[in-house]
Image (cartoon, coloured by chain):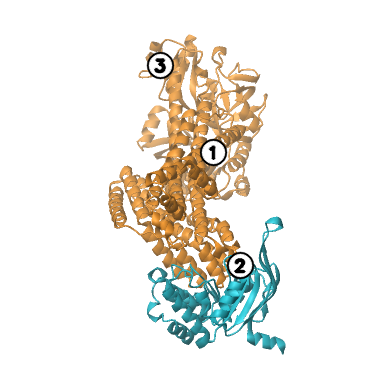
Amino acid sequence: MTTTLTHQTTAASARGLTRTYGDGDSAVHALRGIDLDLPAGRFTAIMGPSGSGKSTLMHCLAGLDAATAGTVTVAGRDLAGLDDTALTLFRREHIGFVFQAFNLLPMLTAGQNILLPLELAGRAVDRARYDQVVGVLGLADRLGHLPSQLSGGQQQRVAIARALVTQPDIVFADEPTGNLDSEAGAEVLGHLRRSVRELGMTVVMVTHELEAATYADDVVVIHDGAVSAHLTDPSQDELVAALRGRSA
Amino acid sequence: MRGVLLASLRHHTRRYVAAALAVVIGVAFVVVTGMLTGATREGLTADVGAPVAAVDHVVTVDDAKAASNLLDAGAERGIPALSLGYAMETVSRDGVQVAASADISEVSLEPALQWQDLQEGRFPTAPGEAVADVNAAKSTDVAIGDVLRIGTGDAATDVEVVGLVDSPAAMGASLYVPWQVLEGFRGTLWVDAVAWGGAPELATDIVPGATVESADDWVAARQAEISRGVDVLAIMALIFVFIALFVGVMVIANTFAILFAQRMRDFALLRCVGVTRRQLRRAVRLEALALGLAASALGVAVGAALGYGLVALVRHWHADMGSAAPDPLWTGGAFVIGLVVTLLAAWLPTRSATTVPPLAALRPDTGVDVRSAVGRWRLGFAGLFLAGGAALLAVSVVSHTVPVMLAGGSAAFIGVLLLGPVLVPTLIRAVGRVVGDGPVRQLATGNAVRNPRRTATTAASLLIGVTLTTAVLTGLASTRTELDREMDDEYPLDATITAVDAPLAADLAERAGAVEGVAEVAALDGTVATIGRIEVPLVGIDRRPGVVRGTEDLAPADDVLVLPYDVIEELPRAMAHQAWKGREVTVTVGGHEHRLPVEPSSGWGRAGIVSGATLAALDSSPQPTAVWVRADDGADAEDLRGDLAALAGASGAGLDGGYSNRAWVNLQVDVMTGAVVGLLAIAIVIALVGIANTLGLSVLERGRENALLRAMGLTRSQLRRAMAAEGLLLSGVATVLGTALGLAFAWIGVEVLIGTVVDDAGMTVPVAQVAAVAVVAALAGLGACVVPARKAARVTPAAGLALD
């Protein structure tokens, strides 16, 4: 029963996850044996200074990049055994993405961008789900616009809607507020938290902004390619202490 | 600035490959044309003067008769005289045909006039002897001592080969016989001049009105004439060079436009750090100059190498080709053209690229989203050109004026090209919708129309090649139909075997029917008649035999004699005169005289035709007299003629018929079609380089986008398919549009060009050929995106997202 239990409570996990770029003297060790369990139905922030390996960690967890060693399990599935096509199909079914920038295809409208993953998968559109997601993100009157006609915050909301519409097991957000002013950023983070609370999604966000991390339920702090802290419902002080302890 | 220039050249070398390739192909094309022209000219003009070296004057005559008079007079008075011309006759040995149509010239019996270069044996000393060209002898396996029969039927003459000679290209023939023999082939003999060792006045006395020139002047004039002929060929080739270069300009301009768009942020950054707009423009243009210099130099080298190779190859088969040497004018011209084309193509993109504001570098968005609007001016001009072109084309169809047609066609085509940014994306969307609406196709369609101007230019480069190829193929096919129709009437019979002295063997028709390439035979009975001292076989026809082509039925009414023009010519003057007027002639058969009205005609060999009833009245027991043959379509003319000549020769009969001419004309059209398509293929190849280039550069531009799509679940094969679909849409739309335009232009061309000759000129669409062009072009478009698609699909999502 352990596996079932893991499946129900853990959306993604890593064991001994190592990622090395290049080899020999010029090798860069981005991740050095990470062990991590990301609980389902929670909003987790992965934090760390730039170059700490947090983006690489996310890419590996999301099946965008292959691990050099160790295992990654997402939605109960070990990603190591999957070839490129299987991995792509897996992503399509189980993972949603929100990136920092260049999130939307410029030639598609907001509505088309939201439906793109379903189209790629050849899946029928669940109208109720679509309306719900669009409603939660407040995009109903923006669906016919091209990305160039939307503000940065609106663009990120479209990207979140796109990530949610497929009902993925886990949504990865890579610095989703990096290109936004603080007001729009707060709005986007609010929407991410609402999607966890109201739609029961699992969201994993990579960020280096303390402000952004305060919206999360859990915070994983990465430093030099290793996990230095995994805090559950941290207070602001605990969070600051965890970050400071590492940067000292 | 120089450091920046060099660094960016180094950095972007690979992206310039396609543009450089277009220039290299164009420049090499010019250099090769120049070298081939030079070698051909050298080969053809060499030793033109050899035949007249021994005399002071050359008399230009109108026909063989005048030449005959001069040569006879020369012989009487001991004046050196030599005919310059040739007869085209069948040559056979022991009843087996050696050559269906060999060119035969005169070899003088006078040693001083024997200008050919003797390689083996000796020159003729009597009329029954001949010398053969050493190359022709080699290819037909003729040796000294062989007895050759020249001509068929009555005119056939036997000569013995006593020597082998070498002779220059322009004046050479395969076989040389003394005048006494050559004179006999009146039917095919053509003499344009006589080398004359006597006084000019004497020549004009003998042939009033003949032109007498000094030998030197005549040689100079001949050389100039040959040069002009070669120049015409060179100019024709240059038309294709121009087309290829025009396509090249589009490909290069597009490459620059895309590269500059991708480097917009670099340019902006340079402007931020203090580079003036002028400096930037200069740097970018210097970059184009460097590219032009390198590509042109490479093009010259490639062209020279190809030129040497090609000339050597041609010389291998064709000894008349001169030696290859790069002509300074052509080579220099090619280099300059390559340079100018590159600079020209870079001019406009450079202007728009350097207007980038410095602030662009500071904008946060990393995606390059290049859009181009379609200007109102452009649409206005497009409309103007289209309307003007259409009007001119309409005028040309009505008035049959070629220059108006060319002007109208060019204007209309420019109109279509200008309209491209609107037209091509619309068509792509329409086609994309027809094909279906899966995500892959939607993506492909969306990407293909994202930048209308870039798409239009890419499509236009292919459009040019496809339009011209389709138009030329259709035009030539229509010409061929028209020629076929004319030849059907001119040569109603493919081959005829006609009895000369004795009746044909009874089984000859059966044996002729068994010859490979024979579709159908008709055996005709007849008799031998004497008309004014000459013996003519007469055949009887009741109704048109199935072997006859064309509209004439050849079956005469009762009591009418149809005589070939050649036979009438042989009749005594008074009788010939009567025959021409269609009056009666006296025909003697079996000792009985009959008077029959005459109809002159031709096309079936040396025999008269009467109706079956008339034949029965003339001779109660007719004998097999003629076998008429219809060839299979596409039968080998040489083989067919050789096989039939063997049959005819064995029974002492004459062989005639139009199949060789028909096959020769068809071959000319085929050669022309092949040459034109081959030359246009160069433009199409450049266009495909352009498509590959546009797609390849777009892949770089869309790196992040593709990575995003891959992250969201687009599989590698879906991405490859999307790229393939994009390439196919682009080439497909260009092909469809090109085929439609090509057919329209061909129709107009047929109306204007053939319409002047025949009233009911029809257009023949060579469906298979046109379809082949369309399929090849469209598939080549697909092929052009193989490399870019693989490149795009190879990038992992994470790496793509990290791209700057």
| Image point (46%, 48%), residue name | B252
User: Where does label 3 land, which residue?
Assistant: B213
C-alpha distance separating marks 2 and 1: 50 Å
Q: Earlier in the sequence, mark 3 or mark 1?
A: 3
Looking at the rendered structure, the secondary structure element under dot 3 is strand
C-alpha distance separating marks 3 and 1: 49 Å
Pick the front one: B476 or B483:
B476
Residue B701, x across and y down, in percent: 49, 59
User: Where does label 2 land, which residue?
Assistant: A52
C-alpha distance separating marks 3 and 2: 98 Å
Q: Colour of chain B?
A: orange
Kindly give the residue lying farthest to the bottom in the view shown.
A1
Residue B613, x across and y down, in percent: 46, 48
Residue A102, x across and y down, in percent: 48, 67
| Image point (64%, 35%), residue name | B95
Read off the chain for label 2. A
Q: Name the side, left or right, on which B160 lies relative to B113.
A: right
* Residue type at tag 1: Leu
User: Where does label 1 land, which residue?
Assistant: B298
Residue B371, x across and y down, in percent: 40, 60
Q: Are marks 2 and 1 in contact (CB under 8 Å)?
A: no
* Residue type at tag 3: Glu
In this rendering, is residue B585 above or below B460?
A: above
| Image point (52%, 79%), residue name | A214
Q: Colour of chain A?
A: cyan
Q: Name the side, left or right, on which A244 lies relative to B259.
A: right
Pick the front one: B21 or B404:
B21
Looking at the rendered structure, the secondary structure element under dot 1 is helix
